[in-house]
Image (cartoon, helix red, strand yellow):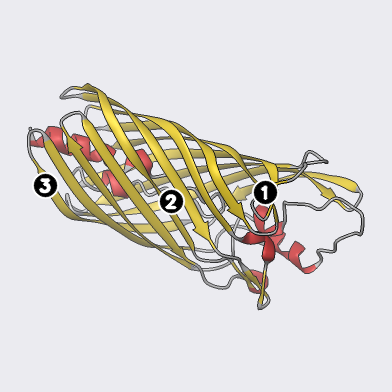
Amino acid sequence: MKNFNLFLISLSGFATSIHACDLCAVYSATQAHGEIGKGFFGGAAEQFTHFGTVQENGREVPNETGQYLDSSISQIYGGYNFNDRAGLQFNLPLIYRSFKRPKGFSIDRGTESGLGDVSLLANLRAYRHEAMNFTATWSIIGGVKFPTGNSDRIKEELNEIEVPGAPESGIHGHDLALGSGSYDGIIGSGIFVRYQRAFLTANTQYAIRSTGDFDYHYANDLTWSGGPGVYLLLEDNATISLQLIVSGEHKNRDTFQGDLADDTGITSFYLGPQINFTWNEKISAEIGADLPVSIANTALQTVADYRIRAGITYRF
């Protein structure tokens, strides 16, 4: 039964490891897969977010020009667990963004794609309790995000001019940039509790940002996700579970050349279903969707309408 309990633990963090922040999403698979013994692991994760609603200070306003931003973050990751308590993981994000926005009295359409900011994470399982019908774990993560993504889009902030009478854009250079140009710290924690077929996960991650290119400083960002679930299939070599995920983020306003950027603060809450699958202690997979319940933003921003997440991890 010990190996079976470890198999359940391998799913725990994986169920909620894609976080809310579209700009700085870091897939922390080690929180899940650092708990299943020594060896290598790798995988891929995808998060697609559609931003098509325009809000001003938390209230929806007409989207007269049909402006939108579609953001796809695909992360390829791999790592090594030194034992059943500690491991390292390297994340390589590939980003594709397409957008439509007003620019004065004309319409600006375009795409941005390429490598994002890579990150290196360490995972430590601080606590584990296993029994036939009960499992509980607590894990801690920490790491560094490196400035490998192209930050050129931030230069737009230097030349932004509002044209009187023209529609205002809710999509700016800081939204389109593939990287921040800054070294940032990442800390987080996660818990998993199971009783028979019911379980609960809770994960949080905090990004500690530094000043990057063009004297732009993205604000520190707190993200969280988790929720209750139930195992629909609970066998020695496979599990299928259904989970309700509550997620969100809180970020204050960014700073640009010493001044606060009014259109950058946000507090959001999402709710959605997620299906988790594991097989033969080797493969874990998930797919889920998030719908916004509440989004409180500062100034005028284009905010998310929905988010789709998927991922798969293989342990060698």
Residue 259 sits in quarter? bottom right
Disc 3 marks a residue whose amino acid type is His
Distance of label 3 from label 1 (alpha carbons)? 46 Å
Q: Which residue is drawn at 56% across and 64% down?
A: 252
The percent position of residue 108, horizontal first and vertical second, equals 83, 46
Q: Residue 91 carries which label?
A: 2
Disc 1 marks a residue whose amino acid type is Arg
For the C terminus, the quadrant is: top left
Horizontal relation, residue 131 to residue 96: left or right: left
Q: Is label 3 in contact with label 1 (beta carbons under 8 Å)? A: no
For the N terminus, the quadrant is: top left
Q: In the rendered image of this protein, does residue 91 appear above or below residue 7?
A: below
Q: Which residue corresponds to mark 1?
A: 59
Q: Which mark is residue 289?
A: none
Q: Is residue 316 visible?
A: no
Tell me which numbered mark, 2 or 3, is placed earlier along the sequence.
2
Q: Which residue corresponds to mark 3?
A: 129
Q: Residue at x 92, y 54 (%)?
A: 165
Q: Is residue 210 visible?
A: yes
Q: Decide: few, some or many residues near mark 3? Use Cα within 10 Å; few <14, some 14-19, many ≥20.
A: few
Q: Decide: few, some or many residues near mark 1? Use Cα within 10 Å; few <14, some 14-19, many ≥20.
A: few
- Secondary structure at badge 1 equals strand
